[in-house]
Image: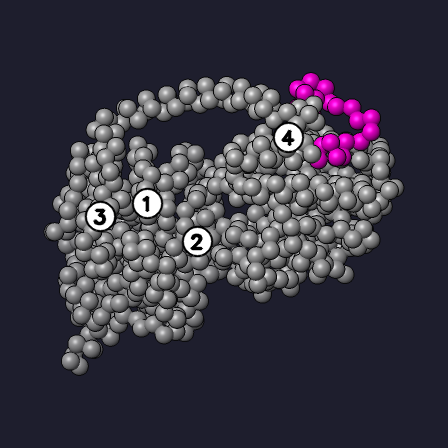
Amino acid sequence: MPKFSIVAPVYKVQGYLPECLDSVLGQDCTDFEIIAVDDCSPDGSGAILDEYAKRDTRIHVIHLTENVGLGRARNAGLEKATGDYVLFLDSDDTLSEGALSAIRDRIETTGDPEVLIFDYARTYWDGRSRPNLRADLLKEDGPDAFSLAERPQLLDLLQIVWNKAYRRDFIARTGLTFPPGYYEDAPWTFCSLISAERIAVLDRVCVHYRQRREGGNILNTVSRKHFDVFDQYRRVFDYLDAHEELAEWRGPLFRKMVDHYLTVLERPGRLPRDARAEFFHRASADYRARVPKGFTRPGAGRGVKYGLLERDAYTTMMSALTAVKYRQQARTRVRTALNRSKRVAMGAFYQSQRRLPLDEKLVLFSAYWSRSVSCNPAAIDAELARLAPDMRRVWAVRADNADRVPKGVKVVRVGSRDYWAALARAKYLVNNVNFADSVIKREGQIHVQTHHGTPLKTMGLDQQKYPASTDMDFEKLLERCDRWDYSVSANRFSTVIWERVYPCAYTSLETGYPRNDVLANATAENVRAARAALGLADGAKAFLYMPTHREYQPGFTPPLNLAMFARELGPDATLLVRGHYFYGNSPHIAELRRTGRVVDVSGHARVEELYLAADALITDYSSAMFDYAVLDRPIISYVPDWDIYSAVRGTYFDLLQEPPGAVATTQSELLGLLATGAYDSPETAKRRDAFRRRFCEFDDGHAAERVVRRVFLGEESLPPVVPFDERHHAPTPLQALELVERA
């Protein structure tokens, strides 16, 4: 029997769930079980739970066959609990370091109380943390354990269940369960506190209460479901009626009820406008039916509202609230005027174009800050031309990159009138990065964010933990991400990360990366053509070297001695070197071009053609490894500065422990792998297979089609992903040569 049973209901939290589970599994107190209840979550949360449960036997997963809501999901977990104490943890929140040890120690020193109340802190996407405003109520003064009558002010704490540890036999004795509805915490919290004979407090933050930027709190939604609060307090007073010995709490709980009703009524974003009068009248009826004899109203403005509620004076109450609203609107007008001045600075032309109707057939593409026509947007463009030829496709390209545009592609120069007109009028905006801050998304426009790599290095909000790697304005970043309607994902691993680090209200499209379709569908002729375009001789080995950008280096400084490396490779091998797109063509290897043994392909327009031409990939932390893995060809991770890179930028997994193939940390090790052929062995193939199954799960050659059918054609039923073991692979350069010779 464990000390703690931690019940965690789970619904649409795949971006946060791993952090929640890790915060529990990483506790120094290990005497616990986790009962995770998958409330028929439509995202990947259930799969994440199953994956964790395979690795740790302390995790027990319950998969519900229908969505039952938070309260009843907790009940399902509670039925399976075996621990001495039960804790409830929402699956987007986390335990603080050492929390369970502190809770265990406090329970022991206070003589096993029925309820232990501990502290929490609100945490925000930008790294801020705000303490519980009533943390003073948890000071460990006086007796170790006490009844609520000795500290009735504890009722003023937030009505939540996850800041407490409950003795399981106490729960069984009182028969407490969670009701359905929005406000299920109220009856559980109040009824447990007034029933407990021995309560203790712990003046320590044990839970980090995540304030999700994109919402996620059902209480902040406009709905008639807020009328549920009446049923919850009916349950509270029914409990009081059934327990005459608790009659002393009728007055304090009446006050809590009235305050709660007024909060629902006054808070914007809860009740529909046409439901406010009905809510007020029902609250007034409850007031008159339950007011205790001799009840004294609170003083000041709150007392006035009590009086209006008692008299059912809805019109008077609304007049008072309207006065407050007018003051708020005045402040809003000031802010609106400031925003309007910013829009004016953007140009009258853009504004005038935005007043015109959207062009339902116009699609504006951009890639890599309008540097080229490439990547996922280019693949979507090509598929759109095939499936919806009536759509008009135009690319935003910077003037200094116009020479990189393929023939036949319609272009608007960034900053031109045509560019601003396209931004204002296009129904669809497709980009693999964000458009500029000055772009204002119109109602009805559809923004597709394709991204441009699977993340090994930390991205988005996670970069806040590594300030040496960025000077990004994270609030501005999320304002840009708020424009997204769709986020294209290469794999479930990416989906979970994107939804956490870019917490905005978009739809994730787990389609695979469109740019990788060409790799999955390539033929021997495609491979031969790619090699011929680079001047690679038949039978010659071509190694593609793609180091990534390092924030702590000012320019492209390859960690390889390229001249020495080329000599050691021998005359039958060619090294293709591609610097990160931040750097363009590299002056460091210009002198080596003339030998033909080192080819600078940094400026090559289509990296996919380089992948097809190469026999193997040598890279470090670049997302190229995830794409190249589609080809099922050898990948060598050359990571001489792993400790520095992972410390400065941060990574999502340990590349040394989970590589896509062979690993080298020195140039001599790398040369040894290539000289002996050890980079392509049964062991490296096994690693590559595991890597591919994890990161190439959707890349079956139909990713662009799925995106086009879902976004542009509005189809809900998409081509299914071809099972991993049924996919064919593009031939290697050697296989392509043999196929041609046979033909």
Q: Is residue 152 above or below residue 579?
A: above
Label 4, label 3: how many angstroms apart (C-alpha)?
Answer: 49 Å
Which one is in front in this view, the residue at disc 4 or the one at disc 3?
A: 4
Which one is in front in this view, the residue at disc 3 or the one at disc 2?
A: 3
Q: Which residues are magenta?
A: 286-306
Quadrant in the picture for residue 470: top left
> In the image shown, does 467 or 478 lie closer to the viewer?
478
Label 1, label 3: how many angstroms apart (C-alpha)?
Answer: 14 Å
Label 3, label 2: how many angstroms apart (C-alpha)?
Answer: 29 Å
Which one is in front in this view, the residue at disc 4 or the one at disc 1?
A: 4
Instruction: Identify the amino acid type marked 3.
Output: Lys
Count of numbered tags: 4
SS for callout 1: strand
Query: Tag on residue 447?
Result: 1
Which one is in front in this view, the residue at disc 2 or the one at disc 4?
A: 4
**Residue 447 placement (x, y as % from top left):** 32, 45
Residue 110 visible, this angle: no
| Lateral position of residue 279 relative to residue 593, left or right | right
Query: Tag on residue 262?
Result: 4
Instruction: Identify the amino acid type marked 4.
Output: Leu
CB under 8 Å between callouts 4 and 1?
no
CB under 8 Å between callouts 4 and 3?
no
| Lateral position of residue 523 relative to residue 178, left or right | left
**Residue 402 placement (x, y as % from top left):** 15, 43
Which residue is label 2 attached to? 495
